[in-house]
Image (cartoon, rainbow, N blue to C red):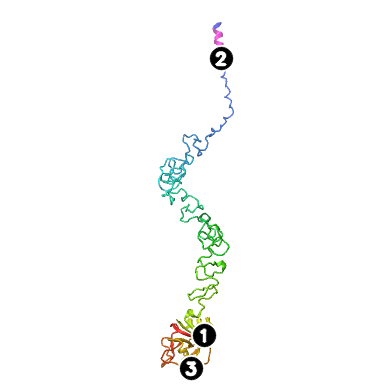
Amino acid sequence: MLLVLLACTTDALDTVPPVDTAPPVDTAPPVDTAPPADTAADEVCDGVDNDGDGEIDEGFDADGDGHTTCGGDCDDEDAFVHPDAPDVCDGIDNDCSGAIDEEFDSDGDGDSACGSDCDDTDPATSGHLPEVCDGVDNNCDDEVDEGFDADGDGYTTCRGDCDDSSADTYPGAAEVCDGITNDCDGDEVDENADSDGDGQSICDGDCDDAEADSFAGGEEVCDGVDNDCNGETDEREECYGCTASDSYLACTDPRSWEAASEICVFFGYQLVTIEDAEEDGVLSGLVSDKAWIGYNDRSTEGTWEWQSGSTSTYTNWNSSEPNDSGGEDCAELNFGSGGQWNDQSCVAERMFLCER
């Protein structure tokens, strides 16, 4: 009985169909997670590894000299300029010390002769300094105190100009009569206005303070100077060798015809007009040599006339005269033994005869 039961049990188990298990539940799809955040900072020039790449201030050494501007490179465009560079004499701050050619700078002004220092013994002189009013070419531009001479007289206030608004006032200027200390001596006004020491200054009427023989009220003498300051020179007849005789003035100092005419007029005369032989004889005896008279053809060649405008037709030409030899337009007397006349170049110098 036991065996049959076991057999039935076996058959029953064989007929049970396999159980289909449910497929695994499809859970929610995986979430795409964000990539890890980039937490590295940008590299800046500060001596720190900002981006954590193991390098410091990369990208900030433009000239590749191993030094950045934040590391002290004062010129990141020049590989020969950085804090460790040797200083050479080239007018550049090679070692970024703030001084130029300091090892070659004798006066310690931050510049050297190999730079722009035109006087390396004077610390107030360098091509890098501004010009100041001190009588020195501070900025080495070959000018001294430029910009400090307002009146353009060549002197600045730092060189003693006591009035830089007046070009007539500076040290050494001639003192003139103007109520100003022209020479900037600080003592007196117009003290040297009597430059010639004649006891009279231009303030008192001296018309030529460089000539001691010229002052107001002086006595006129024959010296080519306006001695009495009346605006005329040598206004004495004797200054021209002239001697008055009746209405005539006989002058023995030779002059050109034009100059003789001017002297006659100066004294109230004119070159003589000869009316007849008698007058001709008188005039010939007043001078010892050839002398100008007023007869001339300067206006029209061959047309002789008297300077006075007289219509006198008297003449006393020497033989074959006038002949206009070489351009002779003025008449002289005493050309012959009888006082005859000759035409002569007007620029020749002769004695001359004037009349009122």
Residue at coordinates 55% horizontally, 13% vertically from top-left? 11
User: To which quarter of the image does residue 30 belong?
Assistant: top right
Which residue was labeled with disc 3?
Answer: 278
**For the stretch drawn in magenta, what is the main secondary structure?**
helix
Cα–Cα span, label 1 and label 2: 182 Å
Looking at the picture, which amino acid does disc 1 mark?
Answer: Gln
Label 2 close to label 3 by CB (< 8 Å) = no
Which residue was labeled with disc 2?
Answer: 13
311 vs 165, nearest the viewer: 311
Which residue was labeled with disc 1?
Answer: 270
Magenta highlight on residue 239: no
The earlier-in-sequence mark between 1 and 2 is: 2
Pair 2/3: label in front:
3
Cα–Cα span, label 2 and label 3: 200 Å
Range drawn in magenta: 3-15
Q: Secondary structure at mark 3?
A: helix
> In the picture shown, does residue 133 fall above or below 62?
below
* Image quarter of the N terminus: top right
> In the picture shown, does residue 141 fall above or below 316?
above
